[in-house]
Image (tube, helix red, strand yellow):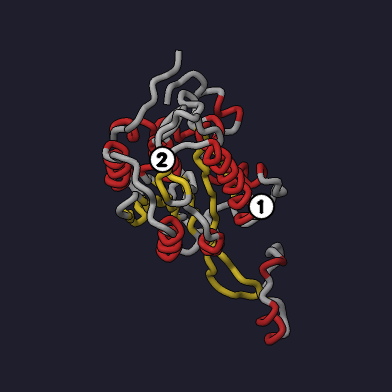
Amino acid sequence: MTAEIQLSISLAELQGLRSFATALHLNKLVSKSRLMLGERSGATLGRGLEFSEVRSYQMGDDLRHLDWKVTARRGQPFTRVYQEEQQRPVMLFVDLASQLQFGLAGSKAVLAAKLAAVLSWSALQDKDLVGGWIETDQQSYWQPAVKQAREVSPFLARLATITQNLGELKPRAPEQLDKALDAFARRLPRGALAVVISDWVGWANPTSLKRLAQRGSLLLVHLTDPLDQNLPANAGPVVLQGKIQPVTSALQEAWQAAFLQRVANLKKAVGQQAGYLQLSTTNQDNWLKPLLPTSSYADTTGINL
């Protein structure tokens, strides 16, 4: 029997996801997503390093931190000293356009809200700050980075309210997603981890992603549904190229081609500068699985999230 599709979510449900964040760590998630793109494993992603001072070289100092200009000027080795930043900002961009509520297996809007909540709780448990941007058809919402659970509740409440009031399908304004990503990048604190959650319909400008990657670490989450590739002949009107159109055989072909091209363009745009992860509506009961290490997932199997 097919599970009933959840079309909205409540604040209480988003707050209830806090317990599942204990198995999720954002550094590991970003590293995993980069490996899936074929990038070689490198240094572990951390909160980043903040410059502190330049001092005389001491035995055991990391040679990579030698300050060659000061060394040449003084005639003896000097090293740059860094301190680990104690709280990294984790900034979420959550796309909640009306088009994300429609799907064969589930609502991408609800999936986006769930993911944003779990990532928020995960950031807080790791002593990071968390904030973000919510983009809808008509309006954008900005939440400055906060450090306490009670302070993130307004952001989660906004997510829940939007899923409950998505209403009828509305075409996204041309370049709206690109402009929103640019605005998000301008607000990002330097050294932040940015996670962009979207189905990426309407995205067209790779430069917006490059700007985000220049600010810190970047993870792109691509929300998908079976309808993204295979559009039934009896499907209602859909948005393609910014227009609501009826389904025809020609549109079905163009629809699938547009999805495959979107995936290719995203992966090409991020290259080795960011992570890319697909998350599908098809696993409504175990949607958290792709985010977790196998050992961690074993503890959550069978739990309806």
Q: Is residue 288 above or below residue 205?
A: above
Residue 200: x and y, percent?
49, 48
Say whether residue 61 is left or right of residue 233. right
Rendered image quadrant of residue 255: top right
Q: Nearer the viewer, mark 2 or mark 1?
A: 2
Nearer to us in this view, 263 or 215: 263
Say whether residue 81 is left or right of residue 73. left
Say whether residue 237 is left or right of residue 8. right
The amino acid beneath tag 2 is: Leu
Q: Is residue 280 above or below residue 83?
A: above
Q: Which residue is mark 1?
A: 43
Residue at 52% from the left image edge and 41% from the top image edge: 251
The amino acid beneath tag 1 is: Ala
Residue 108 visible within the image: yes
Residue 121 visible within the image: no
Residue at 27% from the left image edge and 46% from the top image edge: 154
Measured Cα–Cα span from mark 2 to mark 1: 35 Å
The circle on residue 100 is 2
* Contact, mark 2 vs mark 1 (Cβ under 8 Å): no
